[in-house]
Amino acid sequence: MKILAIESSCDEFAAAIVEDGRFVLSEVVNSQIDIHKIYGGVVPEVAARSHLETALAVVDECLQGFAWDDIDAIAVTAHPGLIGSLMIGTLVARTLALLKKKPLYAVDHIEGHIYATFLADRADYLPDFSPHLFRSYEERSASDSLCDSIASLPPDSGLMTSQEMSRRHRERLQKTPQFPFLALVVSGGHTQIMLFRDHNDYEIIGKTRDDAVGEAFDKVAKILGLPYPGGPSIAKSAERGNSNAYNLPKPKVDGLDFSFSGLKTAVLRAVQREVGVDHTFPSASLSERLTASQRDNFAAVFQKTAVEILVDKIAEATRKYEAKSIVLAGGVAANQELRRALAEVFAVECSSEHPYEFLSIPPMQWCTDNAVMIGARAYFLTKENPPINPRELEIFPTK
Ligand code: KG4
Ligand code: ZN
């Protein structure tokens, strides 16, 4: 089954064609990062206007090489997200569904992030993977045996031998997260742990009581004078910093809930102390007083603390709930330090008598917003749910 998926909930307008929830046949993402960088964050009205300008071009580009007869269904993100942004994507999807008489599925953005881990992962074994790689059927069948193309990579092409790559490739193609699984969702708007018993049976077992972790990355980046989006800029700055240079308190939150606003304030106070001003000093002017190495150290300390908070909670969740897989999802899943720390913790846990079969993290390009994950999620919705009437599709910005 081939699904045309559309994602527009924030500042990316993306379209993709995904087959059977696993294989990406085509993908186009238009990111507005360069526009929002100027303002230091996403401006909702600007995001919606930009979606309006690019939506049709993105969908058109995505469909190049495909006929409408190839498409079995259309899926679109309907919640949560910025209201104006959601309106543009859903309007495009509803119109196409009506005109082309295709079944329409409304997808939850957070569920989408999690289902990025159900996709066959090409980035791991094809170092030069690009979203356009499998644009058409012809190209896909030309390299249908991915193992062949892997085997033909030069032996010094990177990280692994071609044999090792094809072994990993086969494993990945066969494996998807096993139920029940625990998902740690870490994005700009959400931080939560979910227990999935089946595709349509899950509960949120812990969530942030204030800021999302991505939001904390973005806010701390502002304090440190690092560009938007804060996550990647902090990660880059942290590479040069000393993560033991300062001490930041970790919040004590009962159960599996999180809190990140205290950590952000702790960074603010520590920076004020470091540069010798009191708590009334405006945070917008603080970064001018920081040296490059102080800034890098704060980035490293903040990142380490945020990662520890996340890892501690998911580890606690695995002790409380029986799960076969652990899934990491959302924009902050692109953070290398978090990926490394989780791999370390769960490698240790897996070596003992542990029920987890594996830790699943999407490839980098499918951690942040994209339409591929919406197509993957929609495939599993089509199995158990009727399509939605395009005239009745509702959007829920905060649901
Ligand atoms: O999932 P996403 O693209 O959008 C939402 O649904 O929110 O996540 C965006 C968030 C931003 O807060 C961004 O700073 C963060 O993900 N992010 C990162 C990294 N890349 C993106 N945070 C930490 N490290 C990264 N490498
Ligand atoms: Zn997202």
Image (cartoon, rainbow, N blue to C red):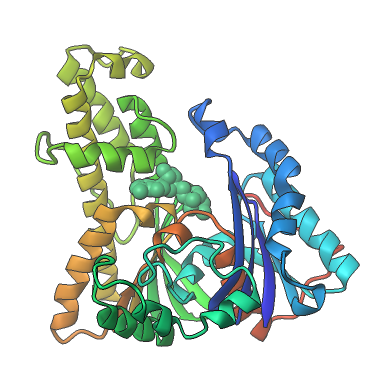
Q: Residue at x 14, y 74 (%)?
A: 348
Pick the residue in front: 174 or 57: 57
Q: Quadrant of residue 278?
A: top left
Q: Quadrant of residue 68?
A: bottom right
Examine the rendered structure and indicate whether residue 239 appears above or below residue 20. Answer: above
- Give coordinates of residue 295: x percent, y percent: 22, 27
| Residue 323 at least partly seen | no
Pick the residue in front: 99 or 76: 99
Q: Residue at x 87, y 70 (%)?
A: 100
317 displayed left or right of 199: left
29 displayed left or right of 195: right
Q: Residue at x 33, y 43 (%)?
A: 260
- Give coordinates of residue 375: x percent, y percent: 61, 70
Examine the rendered structure and indicate whether residue 8 appears above or below residue 140. Answer: above
Examine the rendered structure and indicate whether residue 216 appears above or below residue 17. Answer: above
Q: Residue at x 24, y 36 (%)?
A: 299
Q: Quadrant of residue 196?
A: bottom left
Query: Which quarter of the rendering shows the N terminus?
Result: bottom right
| Residue 173 at least partly seen | yes
